[in-house]
Image: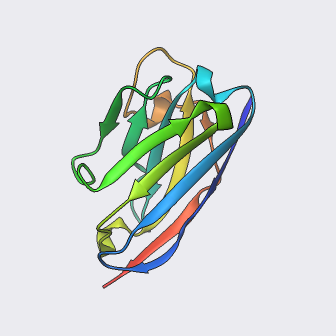
């Protein structure tokens, strides 16, 4: 079992930055592929970014590529999402997730464990 807790959300103006953290407890997070998803009001949860176990491989949704950076520190059992140039359309609850599978994935159903989410609000 893996327990995930996100933090770092908040309210910023357009063009601002935030860094989200996801701390894992239970099993070592180094054994899992990890990802970030987000869900805006009235919309389905969508893929944001994913990272391989080692951190060497990453994948991003086209809407955030070049603005967001996913990283991880397995020694700290922590994953991060650095977000730059935030826009109002980035407003959502952001969730971290862990996947016990064998490849990096953007599919929500592939992830086995989820955090409770952290709210990000971007005003224009």
In x, y percent, where is residue 121? 45, 75
* Left or right position of 17 against 28: left
Quadrant of the drawing holding the N terminus: top right
* Left or right position of 91 against 72: left
Q: Can you tell which quarter of the image residue 76 is in? A: top right
Residue 1 vertical position relative to residue 36 in the rendered view, above or below: above
In x, y percent, where is residue 54? 48, 23
* Left or right position of 103 against 34: left
Q: Nearer the viewer, residue 16 or 44?
A: 16
Residue 3 vertical position relative to residue 63 in the rendered view, above or below: above
- Residue depicted at x 21% and y 47%: 62
Q: Nearer the viewer, residue 71 or 116?
A: 71
Quadrant of the drawing holding the C terminus: bottom left
- Residue depicted at x 52% and y 37%: 72
* Left or right position of 123 against 24: left
In x, y percent, where is residue 69? 36, 48
Q: Nearer the viewer, residue 52 or 106?
A: 52
Number of dots carrying numbers: 0
Residue found at the very far right of the displayed protein: 26
Colour setting? rainbow
In x, y percent, where is residue 66? 23, 51
Residue found at the very far top of the displayed protein: 102
Q: Can you tell which quarter of the image residue 30 is in? A: top right
- Residue depicted at x 41% and y 36%: 50
Q: Nearer the viewer, residue 113 or 25?
A: 25
- Residue depicted at x 53% and y 51%: 95
């Amino acid at each position: 079992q893996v327990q995930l807790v996100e933090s770092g959300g908040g309210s910023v103006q357009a063009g601002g930055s935030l860094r989200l953290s996801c701390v894992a407890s239970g099993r070592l997070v180094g054994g899992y592929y990890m990802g970030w998803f987000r869900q805006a009001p009235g919309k389905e949860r969508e893929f944001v970014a994913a990272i391989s176990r080692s951190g060497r491989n990453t994948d991003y949704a086209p809407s955030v590529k070049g603005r967001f950076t996913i990283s991880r520190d397995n020694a700290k059992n922590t994953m991060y999402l650095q977000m730059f140039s935030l826009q109002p359309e980035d407003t959502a609850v952001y969730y971290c997730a862990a996947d016990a599978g064998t490849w990096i994935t953007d599919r929500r159903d592939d992830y086995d464990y989820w955090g409770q989410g952290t709210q990000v609000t971007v005003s224009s």
